[in-house]
């Protein structure tokens, strides 16, 4: 057990550093665009470019991780992320930011596929839920620590300097990966991507997991994109209380990862967990626009987000176990592809509804979509339990 822990800890630390840097970028980029004379449309386009690039390159990145080794892909992702972070920091106009954001999307795609498939190579299947719980906890710590450190640094640094210096976090991840992350040799899987895709997609659990992932990311992405504006415009909260609400939700999300991972490891029928959990979270989204004030909305978010966090852990385990060691990168690339498609799709579609008809209509439409996808997940999931030696059924 201690040997496995010693091999996984560097992955968690590297992941925390990478996602802290990404969180600094998410915090600083809109402000930097405003400094450079850009508008909200350009901010939205910049984030869309990053998401679309990450979605489009997740599957090729996973395939290359299988071909050349996960550690090499992780090193490449860190280098790309660091270069793009510096590029954003030194840019003096908005136009170059689009190039750097597209490059950053490529790094995100490669990094996520490499991190998750590396972990799945090391950890026994019976403990994979807990391992992914620790990995995603590292993500959450990074998301909290990055903006906090950047905000503190603005007392002494300009926004441009803070964004540029945050690339040091990629340097820490690079040092950790070079010195402590186990090397994973590539496999002679050829250059045929269709074969691994056909094998993975041939499992019935793949359809259920993909639909569940799409539902989870559409609901989550829509809420997170518009939660600050909802807090300001409908709940009437001051900026400080909006920040507290988002922070409390983030803490609840992080704290749920370890017990959620234990639950996932103990459940043989994870498809049931995914469908029911997604449906429960969609219902909470439908309730949200009917609430008033800080405490009722914050309590609902804090209670419901652990449910969705556990759904994400179950989805990670299902995708990882659909593959053989030779195709695990492809499986996690598919995971990332569906993830970023949903995160980009939800805010665009339901944001349009909100702009025309208000938050009640937008959140309700998103919740109904989530419920429909939850029901489809339950319909598609395999009904039998996993047998020893067989790929995991959802």
Image (cartoon, rainbow, N blue to C red):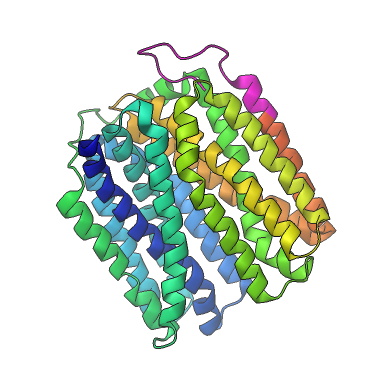
Locate residue 103 relative to residue 217 in the image: left or right.
Answer: left
Is residue 393 one of those drawn in magenta?
Answer: yes
Locate residue 144 relative to residue 211 in the image: left or right.
Answer: left
Q: What is the magenta range?
A: 375-394
Q: Position of residue 357 (x, y in %)?
A: 84, 57
The residue positioned farthest toward the bottom in the image shown: 156
Residue at 40 percent across and 37 percent down: it is 130
Magenta stretch, overall SS:
loop
Quadrant (top left, top right, bottom left, bottom right) of the N terminus: top left
62 above or below 44?
above
304 above or below 31?
above
Q: Position of residue 247 (x, y in %)?
A: 56, 63
Q: Position of residue 133 (x, y in %)?
A: 43, 42
Residue at 56 percent across and 80 percent down: it is 34
Which quadrant of the structure image shows residue 387?
top left
Residue at 52 percent across and 65 percent down: it is 46
Residue 99 visible, this angle: no
Is residue 105 one of those drawn in magenta?
Answer: no
Q: Position of residue 270 (x, y in %)?
A: 53, 26
Which of the pair 361/269 is nearer the observer? 269
Which of the pair 149/365 is nearer the observer? 149
Residue 90 visible, this angle: yes
């Amino acid at each position: 057990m201690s040997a496995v822990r010693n091999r996984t800890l560097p992955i968690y630390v590297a992941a925390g550093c990478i996602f802290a840097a990404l969180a600094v970028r998410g915090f600083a980029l809109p402000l930097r665009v405003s400094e450079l004379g850009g508008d909200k449309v350009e901010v939205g386009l910049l984030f869309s470019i990053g998401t679309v690039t990450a979605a489009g390159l997740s599957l090729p990145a996973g395939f290359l991780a299988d071909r050349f080794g996960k550690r090499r892909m992780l090193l490449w992702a860190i280098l790309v992320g660091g270069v793009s972070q510096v590029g954003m920091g030194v840019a003096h106009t908005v136009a170059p930011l689009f190039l750097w954001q597209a490059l950053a999307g490529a790094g995100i795609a490669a990094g996520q596929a490499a991190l998750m498939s590396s972990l799945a190579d090391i950890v026994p299947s019976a403990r994979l839920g807990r391992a992914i719980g620790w990995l995603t906890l590292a993500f959450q710590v990074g998301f909290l620590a990055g903006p906090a450190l950047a905000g503190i640094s603005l007392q002494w640094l300009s926004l441009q300097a803070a964004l540029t210096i945050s690339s040091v976090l990629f340097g820490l991840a690079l040092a950790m990966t070079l010195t402590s992350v186990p090397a994973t040799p590539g496999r002679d899987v050829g250059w045929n991507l269709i074969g691994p895709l056909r094998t993975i997609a041939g499992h019935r659990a793949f359809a259920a997991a993909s639909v569940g992932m799409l539902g989870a990311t559409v609901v989550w992405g829509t809420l997170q994109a518009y939660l600050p504006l909802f807090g300001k415009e409908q709940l009437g909260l001051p900026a400080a209380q909006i920040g507290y609400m988002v922070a409390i939700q983030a803490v609840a999300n992080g704290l749920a990862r370890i017990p959620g991972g234990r639950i996932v490891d103990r459940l043989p029928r994870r498809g049931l967990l995914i469908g029911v959990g997604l449906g429960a979270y969609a219902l909470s989204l439908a309730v949200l626009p009917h609430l008033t004030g800080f405490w009722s909305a914050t309590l609902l978010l804090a209670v419901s987000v652990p449910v969705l966090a556990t759904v994400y852990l179950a989805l990670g385990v299902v995708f990882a176990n659909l593959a053989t060691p030779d195709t695990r990168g492809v499986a996690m690339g598919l995971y990332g592809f569906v993830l970023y498609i949903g995160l980009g799709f939800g805010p665009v579609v339901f944001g349009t509804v909100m702009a025309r008809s208000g938050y009640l209509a937008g959140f309700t439409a998103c919740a109904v979509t989530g419920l429909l996808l939850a029901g489809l997940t339950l319909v598609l999931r395999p009904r039998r339990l996993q047998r020893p030696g067989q790929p995991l059924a959802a």
